[in-house]
Amino acid sequence: MNERIKGLFRALAKRGRGLKTAPPLGFIILILTNRCNLKCKTCLRGESTAQDLDPGLLDGLFTKAKRIGFNAVAFTGGEPIIHPKFGEILRIAGTHGLKLGLVTNGVRWTDYLKVLAPYAGQVNFIAVSLDSHIREINDSIRGPGTYDKAIEAVRSFKKAGYSVRISHVVNKKNYRDLADFVGFANRTVKPDAINLLGIIKTGENTDLLLNAEEKTVFHKELGKLLPRYRNLRVCISTGYYKAPFYCPSFLGLNELTVNCNGELVFCCDNTRTGATLGSLKERPLEELLREYFIRQMEIKDRAIKDVVNSENKSTHDCNYCNEILKSLTPGK
């Protein structure tokens, strides 16, 4: 073995020192309830019978998920705090030592400050929804008074010491204002990050979806924007990337999503019946994960064929997966 190769191995060995475990996986995502105190036009859940996740499923789920490598849980909905046993759910997650994430519309921020206080050291992030720096535009999408509540929520969570993200759903009403929105947020409420989210297509929100030309405008604005805000993390949703296989759901076991019915689903952004892998009330997690990888390969196989045969660049879009899942049989 020559000295150059020996040197390479010595460098790799040195870099590997101290790496005692593999990096953690993503979040366990719990859709705690489909109930909400708002009716946002961009919502992917849609109208349905009220359902709340059974807390009795969580101890076993958390135990097994931690063994796999998950160390964090994110609560979404609906609006998480509307779950009648939200405090109990926090206690179970806290007992397991999991890092906590929260996705909220911010309307009940005062209630969240009270219930989160005992677990403040475990809270990884709080994401608050705000769809425009212009009150009239935001409230036309999310409802009257939601702009003021969201601004209050971000400021109050920041003051309490939490890491706060703004969830910003890019749509026809706001896509041209991206630079102004980020500038406003950075100057006034100073979030730790801004998540730029795509619309998940439902029957109620098609009028807000960006077309191909509008997405091009968005990407041009984004390209100008990112270099200007080195101090602020601007995270881009799957639906707005151009790489055909960007989506983390193509890349292995990135997240575990459980809906309010206690079912493991392929992804938190999937709305079709085919996304359902099976119920944790009826089958163990390890069996449902097998369904997860089968569903993953079915989607990936279709995506590869589409990209190779037609240069389809929309395979990174959540709506692409949802259309495929629409045709697939639910997990048994």
Image (cartoon, helix red, strand yellow):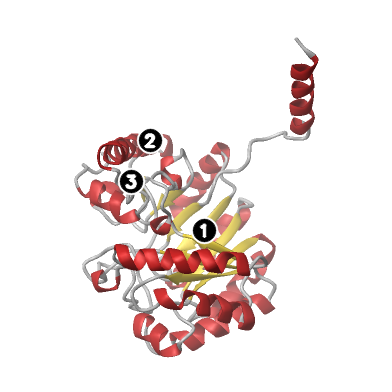
Find the distance from the CA under tag 3 to the CA under tag 2. 16 Å
In the rendered structure, which amino acid carries the disc numbered 2? Phe
Residue pointed to by mark 2: 293
Residue contact between numbered discs 3 and 1, judged by CB atoms under 8 Å = no
Question: Measuring 63% from the left and 69% from the top, which residue is drawn there?
Answer: 229
Q: Position of residue 245 (x, y in %)?
A: 41, 43
Tell me if residue 44 can be seen: no
* Position of the C terminus by quadrant: top left
Residue pointed to by mark 1: 74
Q: Secondary structure at mark 3?
A: strand
Residue pointed to by mark 3: 279
Looking at the image, is mark 3 or mark 2 earlier in the sequence? 3
Q: Position of residue 194 (x, y in %)?
A: 54, 68
Looking at the image, is mark 1 or mark 2 earlier in the sequence? 1
- Residue 175 quadrant: bottom left
Find the distance from the CA under tag 1 to the CA under tag 2. 22 Å
- Residue 230, which numbered label? none
* Position of the N terminus by quadrant: top right
Question: Which mark lies nearer to you, 3 or 2?
Answer: 2
Question: Measuring 48% from the left and 51% from the top, which residue is drawn there?
Answer: 58
Question: Which mark lies nearer to you, 1 or 2?
Answer: 2
Q: Secondary structure at mark 1?
A: strand
Residue contact between numbered discs 3 and 2, judged by CB atoms under 8 Å = no
In the rendered structure, which amino acid carries the disc numbered 3? Ser
Q: Is residue 114 above or below residue 61?
A: below
